[in-house]
Image (cartoon, rainbow, N blue to C red):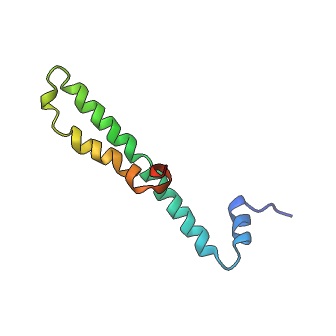
């Protein structure tokens, strides 16, 4: 008897609702990509501050990057809830 692959075994458990398994795979991928964005904005904020180090008045996009950095904290209830 030939062993099934892990994915085909998972699909046998899904039964009639295989579309939900595919939807969860897509949504999980989107979530993984979006979870990186706060770190990108943090990097951009630090990079701008360090690039104008002696004269911090020239750091023009720090507020914008800071707002984008704080956006996930405001939109994800599990993080902003006390």
Residue that extends furthest to the right in the rendered view of this protein: 1
* Quadrant in the rendering for residue 69: top left
Q: Position of residue 27 (x, y in %)?
A: 50, 62
Q: Residue at x 16, y 27 (%)?
A: 56
Relative height, residue 14 to residue 42 (above, below): below
The one nearer the camera, 64 or 12, is 64
63 to 81, vertically: above or below: above
Q: Residue at x 26, y 43 (%)?
A: 65
Give the image location of residue 14, x and y in percent. Answer: 69, 72
Picture quadrant of residue 55? top left
Residue 3: % across, % down: 80, 60
Residue sitting at the far top: 54
Q: Is residue 80 above or below residue 49?
A: below
Image location (x, y in percent) of residue 49? 24, 29
The reply, left or right, for residue 65 in relation to residue 33 is left
Residue under the image location 17 percent in, 33 percent down: 59
Q: Is residue 21 left or right of residue 58?
A: right
28 on left or right of 56: right
Foreground pick, 43 / 72: 72
Residue lying at 59% horizontally and 74% vertically, measured from the top left = 19
Is the residue 46 above or below the residue 30 in the image? above
Instruction: Tell me the quarter of the picture where residue 42 sits.
Output: top left
Quadrant where the N terminus lies?
bottom right
């Amino acid at each position: 008897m030939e062993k099934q692959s892990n994915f085909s075994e998972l699909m046998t458990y899904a039964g009639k609702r295989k579309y939900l398994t595919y939807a969860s795979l897509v949504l999980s991928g989107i979530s993984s990509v979006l979870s990186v964005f706060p770190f990108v904005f943090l990097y951009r904020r630090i990079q701008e501050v360090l690039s104008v180090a002696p004269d911090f008045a020239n750091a023009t996009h720090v507020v914008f990057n800071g707002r984008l950095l704080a956006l996930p904290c405001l939109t994800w209830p599990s993080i902003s809830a006390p």
